[in-house]
Amino acid sequence: MSVIQVTHLTKDYGHNRGVFDVSFEVRKGEVFGFLGPNGAGKTTTIRHIMGFSRPQSGQTSVKGLSSWERHYEIQKDVGYLPGEIALPEHLTGTQFIKMMAELRGMTDMSYTNQLIERFALEASGGLKRMSLGMKRTLAVITAFMHDPAILVLDEPTSGLDPMMQDTFIQFIREEKKRGKTILLSSHIFSEVDATCDRISILKEGRLVSTFVADDLRHAESKEFKIEFSTKEDFERFREQVEYPKRFHVVSVKRHGNQVKVAINDQGINELIAVLSEYSLNFFTEIKFTLEDYFMKFYNRNTKVEGETVNAVH
Amino acid sequence: MFSKTIFKQTLTQNWKLWAAFTGLTAIMSAVIIAVYDPKMIQRMMDMVKDMPGIADMMGDRLNETTSLLGMLGESFYSMQGILLPLIFVIMTANTLVASQVDRGSMAYILSTPIQRTKVIRTQALYLITSILCMFLAVTLVGLGTVQIAHNGLWGQAYTADVKAASDTLGVDKEAAANDLTLILNSPDAIKAGARAREIDEDVYTAYLNLKLSEKAYGAAAEVLGLDIHTVSADPTLIKNDEAALKAAAGVMGLEPMMYGAMLNQAIAQKDMATEQAKAMQEKLMAGITAAAAQLNMEPGDLATSMGKIKGDSKAMHAMISASGLPEGMVAGILNQQLAGDEISLDNGINFKLGNYLLLNLGAFLLIFAIASISFLFSCVFNLTKNSLALGAGIPIACLIFQIMAKASGSLDNFKYLSLNTLFDPRAITSGGTFWPQFTALALLGAALYALGVTVFKEKDLPL
Ligand SMILES: Nc1ncnc2c1ncn2[C@@H]1O[C@H](COP(=O)(O)OP(=O)(O)OP(=O)(O)O)[C@@H](O)[C@H]1O
Ligand SMILES: [Mg+2]
């Protein structure tokens, strides 16, 4: 069942900025990662989901309710963490929390106090004097305080120190276990890697890929780096293995006597058998991370096309 | 309709600015009311009149400025009382909406189950309430000052001469004010009173007599159940009614018969054949013209400040010889004229509560309408700088256009470009029409607030 639905959303700000024909859905109980380089249109999409902007065409809905028309109804079940933290500076942290609780019609503050404790926030000070991390933590608490079923988080860990990031990621995992639906935009691969079930990549306002994170993690293709002890072995390997195409050699480094070989999991025994005939300095697996994958999209110069992206599957 | 929580938080954010501007505006009004001194204003006006350029510019405004409300209308309710609230609303309107959208802090409020329209209506409510409270405070402080400094609301305002004369006589101020004959009968009291009023003793005596006869007409009018103007226009009414005659004579401290004789004289003077009166006028004019030549002044200017003739013996002689009237008569006429001036000065302090409240209502409505402009642009724009460009620019342009229109006749048409023209303090203090303008301000303001709310509801927010 889809909780957040974005269908053919288009918002053209001119000069090829904005979002164009973006469609995806976030299903109940999943953590959905939303990635893309700066200016890709992540925040713009999130603004539409929150009902702050009116779609030029297409539409967004939360729990089947149109974001734009029913913006105040959907907020009951949504916790929102804005990408830019701009708290009302004339309040103290405590006053701000109290105001948000009142606006949400909350009376029971025990969960909120639990969160304050968990994130170790000293909320009594004025917001003007809080450090960036404290303000972000406060924003995190106000996004979660009413224990909403849906969370929309725009770069939630930016500005948090590594300890805090860990606490937060741990927290997201627990929330996921409690059945929360989470949309999370991020630039931090480790965070996405650690939490997300499915991931969409946005580039220049267009959705370039949506995939299941586990498919990538358990990809059957692996790469190995091999360094030969001597030039002779290196040349022999190239003649006997590379040119006859017994294995797929991704790259070679002449001066280091190195080659990079890509194989499927089934081919591992054969590769080891072949390599036993050569004298090696080392033989290592190059860990394939999500990061490697994402970097292709982040690189502004590579024109990404649908088929190369999906080739990973 | 409105959100209590948002109102509360808007209040904590903005009350300091409100308090500062309200305090400043109220103090300004208090000071201007407290230092009001009709005599001083009159002297200032005389001075101004001597300078031809300024006199042209001020035009017919000269005479209305001498009363307290007239002066307030020309000063406070045209400048400080408009300018300070104007700055306040420009700043507040911007913080209420545009700056919160620009900074992004609006995002938190809108990520709760609250309708946009409710948020924006609450902000409009705060703006309107703050303006209302500001003018309430200014009005109350103003009324307090009128009471403390001029006794203008409750109780009798005693003029300086009554205070001085009653001290000399060793009687109550109230007793002296109620029975001016006490002063008239004591040369010492007259001396003290004249000094306090800074006028000659004979002018002061004429003033007391004039006041007394006015009071006598008043007493008679009360007995007759008539308007005082009707009675003073036709004194035979008193003569024909015994009770009225008695009441009036009592005020003058005279026997009814004696007073009756005085009335006869007054009636005779009123009935004086028009030709005779005209001849008299012509003689006087000739006298004044001669005195003016002697004093090197315009005759028209001299007519409104005849004290100058008395102060200059050459001018006095010129007037006597040119008019061909006996010296005693000329002096008498001059005294009468100057006594009349004193009476109109007394009336200056005459504080009309209704008009004062109307001045404040008008200022409130003007600021209410101006604030609606600033509020509208605060709703329209997502960036503070754009919101301020128009939300402050238009109100300030209005103010400047109004000042330009006032300053020079050739720029008079600028007044049609200015909202401020719809609040004309002079129309209130001198009986012009102002309700249609007030209605226009109220309607325009209400419409622009409503428009602001709609715009905000429909627009994209970069939050
Ligand atoms: N209100 C607006 N008017 C005009 N252009 C806009 C507006 N909002 C966003 N844009 C443009 O749309 C593009 C997408 O912006 P968006 O904030 O959605 O990017 P993002 O993916 O969130 O980037 P980041 O990772 O830096 O947060 C940018 O080029 C931005 O300049
Ligand atoms: Mg963003």
Image: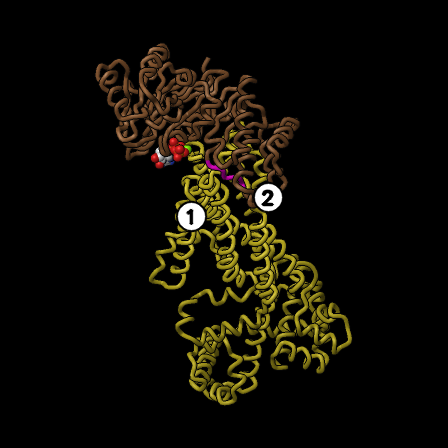
Chain colours: A brown, B yellow
Q: Position of residue B410 (x, y in %)?
A: 33, 62
Instruction: Please state the extent of the stretch shown in magenta in the rendering.
Output: A84-88
> From what the image shows, is residue B302 above or below residue B7?
below
Residue nearer the viewer, A199 or B413: A199
Q: Whole-percent x and y of residue B60? A: 44, 65
Q: Chain of mark 2?
A: A
Q: Residue furthest right?
A: B170
Residue A132 percent across, percent down from the top left = 52, 40
Kind of element beneath mark 1 = helix
The residue positioned 74% from the left and 76% from the top of the image is B167
Would the CB of label 1 be found within 8 Å of ligand 1?
no
Q: Is A293 contained in the magenta span?
A: no
Q: Identity of the amino acid at label 2?
A: Gly
Q: What distance separates the C-alpha of mark 1 from that of mark 2?
A: 28 Å
To which chain does the residue with label 1 belong? B
Report the front residue among A15 and B34: A15
Q: Is residue B329 above or below residue A238?
A: below
Q: Count all numbered tags in the image, as a single digit.
A: 2
Residue at x 57%, y 72% (from the top left corner): B39
Q: Which residue is mark 1?
A: B388
Disc 2 element: loop
Residue B212 vs B188, above or below: the answer is above
Looking at the image, is mark 1 or mark 2 nearer the viewer?
Answer: 2
Dot 2 corresponds to which residue?
A126
Q: Residues within 10 Å of mark 2 (few under 14, many from 20)?
A: some
In which quadrant is the C terminus of chain A drawn?
top left
